[in-house]
């Protein structure tokens, strides 16, 4: 087995991991939603729970899928065209990640650290 074949197999395995993450994340989100409904929470709370859980699994799956693209581009087919395509994929993924973070948390990712430090400075010291 050649190096390219091995790396292509590794890339496929990482892609499979990304797809499995999406499927398992969807099932976990639906289970969490079902549990929420069984506990007689409102439909708005249930929607938020499912949306947050599935959104986080989408983010993780995107990381796996980009990793597979990087492996394939760098190790299997390192051409200028493929590197440009990879760059576009990474830009799109970055935009999607930021958009999903804002949708899930309701604030920009870099604001989370600011809010956490502000909250910790307001806590009374013991």
Image (cartoon, grey):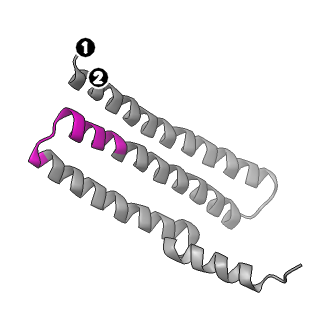
Residue 9 vertical position relative to residue 87 in the rendered view, above or below = above
Q: Secondary structure at mark 2?
A: helix
Query: Which residue occupies 15% across, 40% down?
Result: 78
Residue 19 vertical position relative to residue 52 in the rendered view, above or below = above
Boundaries of the magenta span: 67-81
In the picture provided, is 55 more to the left or to the right than 30?
Answer: left
Query: Which residue occupies 10% across, 48% down?
Result: 81
Percent position (x, y) of residue 86? 23, 50
In the picture provided, is 86 more to the left or to the right than 101?
Answer: left
- Residue that carries the numbered disc 2 in the rendered image: 6
Instruction: Count residues near mark 2 (Cα–Cα under 10 Å), then give few for <14, some for 14-19, many for 20+.
Output: few
Percent position (x, y) of residue 80? 10, 48
In the picture provided, is 37 more to the left or to the right than 105?
Answer: right
Q: Is the residue under label 2 in contact with that under label 1 (CB below 8 Å)?
A: yes
Residue 109 shows up from this direction: yes
Q: Secondary structure at mark 1?
A: loop
Instruction: Count residues near mark 1 (Cα–Cα under 10 Å), then give few for <14, some for 14-19, many for 20+.
Output: few
- Residue that carries the numbered disc 1 in the rendered image: 1
């Amino acid at each position: 087995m050649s190096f390219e074949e091995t790396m292509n197999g590794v890339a496929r395995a990482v892609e499979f991991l990304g797809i499995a993450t999406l499927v398992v994340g969807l099932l976990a989100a639906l289970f969490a939603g079902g549990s929420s409904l069984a506990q007689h929470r409102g439909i708005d709370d249930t929607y938020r729970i499912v949306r947050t859980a599935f959104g986080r699994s989408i983010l993780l799956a995107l990381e796996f899928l980009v990793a597979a693209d990087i492996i394939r581009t760098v190790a299997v087919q390192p051409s200028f065209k493929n590197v440009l395509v990879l760059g576009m994929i990474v830009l799109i993924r970055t935009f999607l990640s930021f958009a999903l973070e804002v949708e899930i948390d309701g604030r920009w990712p870099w604001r989370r650290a600011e809010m956490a430090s502000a909250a910790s400075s307001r806590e009374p010291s013991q």
